[in-house]
Image (cartoon, rainbow, N blue to C red):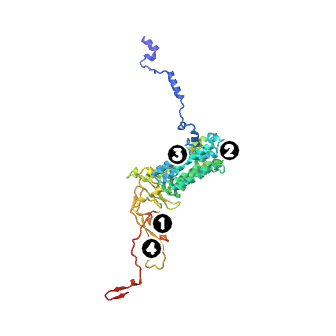
């Protein structure tokens, strides 16, 4: 009997019993069907209300690659000024400003190109071209983004604010360039790399052409490289619409020009490295970036849209490699095997520019300020305007204004009516982490002459020096009688 039961009911009576779940298969299928019927968000932008989504797409917030390419030149510029708490805050401000300014620029671009966008397959779904947003709404949205960008801009020093205001000119005129020239990517480079001019200026408070100009030109060459690849996606539509681009201008010689753009970018980055005394980690990073650019040129298929987009997006990696090489060089110069102190990272790094295109030397460092970031004063308020030496490093800043005495062998009045300034020698100050030291005020080697005492005092007060007045001495007017002496005994005067 048992044998027959085993043959007829093997699932129950065999030694290895298979347990069947209490829930039926049909109920499980119904549950899975109910779960799958719930729409799952594909990205974080699908959670945003539908009324806001057109503005998100208008500002290209859903495509962050453009924001990265706009942000990285400014991040390079700030990183060249040093790893400091204040510079980290500047990178955050630049990041927020990048998103807002890129959104405003894309809005202005779509306003100019709304008629062209309707005729191109890739752009006809843009909010203004498709009618989701009216021109009036787009203008208001651009104004909101520019206003928020200005609130961020005024947190910087005055030279950076001036540069930021000037940047509006290329932002507005860039969309028109594709109508008149085959090099609109060059004007995009002028617009997109403005952060290279502002970053180092915001970190130091002074405009240094030897640093920011080569960096700016490197960014322009980089933009010509990646945006020419990007333009090959639309070259067929551009011919039909009638707009111009470097993709149409260069044609079959595009890869040769891409190599030229890459060489121009790397040569200018080497120039910046020489200007700020970068060491081997920086140049090693440039070798990695150059190989990455070479692989882009070799592997891109300019006739395929998908390949052009992937190569264009890969330039974010190129920019991050360069940023990492700058940061690694700074960490190498700060951290020493005998003294590793992460809290001793200098707060300010300035460069004493000796000539426009010559080498520069790190001239000053300052320890971290324990005050909160919101209470931290601006750099230009505590940095010496001539050489960047923090004022609190000096124990005293005194000078003496005088007219040099005439030598015993000197005749005439030559060089006796000029006022000179004598600088007091200061206590020795140094920064062992950066490997520099000094025993005098940088002004001590400066020889200046003035035609009047007032001009000399204005010069000294401009650089916050205390003018030390010589001690007053009683002045006796010379008279004829002063040449004679009176002898009381003999009552005779002698000369």
Residue 489 in sight: yes
Label 1 vs 4, first from the N-terminus: 4
Q: Secondary structure at mark 2?
A: helix
Q: Counting other residues with Cα less than 10 Å from the Cα at mark 1, is it few (<14), some (14-19), or many (20 or more)?
A: few
Residue 398 lies in what quarter of the image?
bottom left
Label 4 vs 2, first from the N-terminus: 2
What's the residue at 66%, 47% (across, down)?
243
Q: CA distance from mark 2 to mark 3?
A: 33 Å
Instruction: In the rendered structure, find residue 75 and report the number of the disc placed on it.
Output: none
Label 1 vs 3, first from the N-terminus: 3
Q: Secondary structure at mark 3?
A: helix
Q: Nearer the viewer, mark 1 or mark 3?
A: 1
Instruction: In the rendered structure, find residue 404 and report the number of the disc placed on it.
Output: 4
Q: CA distance from mark 1 to mark 3?
A: 51 Å
Instruction: Please give left or right for residue 13 compared with residue 289 in the image.
Output: left
The quarter of the image holding the C terminus is bottom left
Q: Secondary structure at mark 4?
A: loop
Q: Nearer the viewer, mark 1 or mark 2?
A: 1
What's the residue at 55%, 48% (across, down)?
147
Q: Are marks 1 and 4 in contact (CB under 8 Å)?
A: no
Q: Nearer the viewer, mark 1 or mark 4?
A: 1
Q: CA distance from mark 4 to mark 3?
A: 62 Å
Q: Are marks 4 and 2 in contact (CB under 8 Å)?
A: no
Label 2 vs 3, first from the N-terminus: 2
Q: Counting other residues with Cα less than 10 Å from the Cα at mark 2, is it few (<14), some (14-19), or many (20 or more)?
A: some
Q: Nearer the viewer, mark 4 or mark 2?
A: 4
Q: Which residue is mark 3?
A: 317
Return the residue nearer the eye: 468 or 299.
468
Q: Which residue is mark 1?
A: 458
Return the residue nearer the eye: 70 or 374.
374
Q: Which residue is mark 2?
A: 241
Label 1 vs 2, first from the N-terminus: 2
């Amino acid at each position: 009997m048992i044998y027959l039961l085993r043959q007829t009911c093997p699932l129950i009576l065999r030694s290895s019993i298979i347990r069947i779940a209490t829930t039926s298969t049909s109920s499980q299928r119904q549950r899975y069907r109910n779960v799958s019927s719930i729409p799952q968000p594909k990205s974080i932008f699908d959670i945003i209300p539908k009324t806001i989504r057109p503005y998100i797409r208008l500002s290209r917030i859903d495509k962050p690659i453009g924001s990265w390419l706009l942000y990285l030149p400014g991040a390079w510029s700030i990183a060249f000024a040093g790893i400091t708490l204040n510079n980290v805050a500047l990178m955050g401000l630049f990041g927020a400003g990048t998103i807002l300014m890129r959104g405003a620029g894309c809005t202005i671009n779509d306003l100019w190109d709304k008629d062209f966008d309707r005729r191109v397959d890739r752009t006809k779904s843009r909010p203004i071209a498709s009618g989701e947003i009216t021109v009036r709404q787009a203008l208001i949205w651009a104004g909101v983004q520019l206003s928020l960008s200005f609130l961020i801009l005024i947190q910087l020093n005055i030279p950076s604010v001036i540069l930021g205001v000037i940047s509006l000119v290329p932002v507005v005129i860039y969309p028109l360039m594709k109508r008149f020239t085959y090099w609109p990517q060059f004007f995009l480079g002028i617009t997109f790399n403005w952060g290279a001019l502002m970053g180092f200026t915001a970190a130091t408070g002074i405009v240094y052409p030897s640093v920011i100009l080569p960096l700016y030109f490197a960014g322009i060459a980089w933009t010509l490289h990646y945006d020419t690849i990007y333009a090959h996606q639309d070259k067929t539509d551009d011919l039909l619409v009638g707009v111009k681009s470097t993709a149409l201008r260069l044609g079959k010689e595009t890869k040769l020009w891409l190599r030229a753009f890459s060489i121009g970018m790397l040569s200018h980055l080497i120039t910046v490295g020489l200007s700020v005394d970068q060491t081997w980690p920086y140049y090693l990073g440039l070798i990695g970036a150059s190989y990455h650019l070479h692989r882009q040129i070799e592997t891109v298929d300019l006739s395929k849209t998908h390949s052009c987009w992937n190569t264009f997006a890969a330039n974010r990696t190129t920019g991050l490699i360069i940023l990492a090489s700058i940061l690694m060089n700074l960490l190498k110069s700060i951290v020493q095997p005998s003294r590793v102190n992460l809290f001793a990272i200098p707060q300010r790094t300035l460069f004493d520019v000796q000539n426009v295109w010559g080498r520069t030397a790190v001239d000053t460092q300052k320890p971290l300020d324990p005050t909160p970031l919101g209470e931290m004063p601006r750099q230009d308020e505590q940095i010496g305007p001539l050489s960047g030496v923090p004022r609190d490093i000096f124990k005293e800043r005194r000078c003496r204004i005088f007219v040099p005495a005439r030598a015993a062998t000197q005749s005439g009045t030559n060089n006796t009516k000029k006022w000179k300034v004598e600088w007091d020698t200061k206590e020795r100050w140094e920064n062992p982490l950066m490997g520099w030291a000094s025993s005098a005020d940088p002004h001590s080697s400066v020889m200046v002459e003035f035609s009047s005492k007032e001009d000399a005092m204005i010069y000294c007060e401009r650089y916050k020096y205390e003018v030390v007045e010589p001690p007053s001495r009683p002045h006796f007017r010379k008279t004829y009688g002063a040449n004679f002496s009176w002898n009381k005994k003999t009552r005779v005067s002698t000369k």
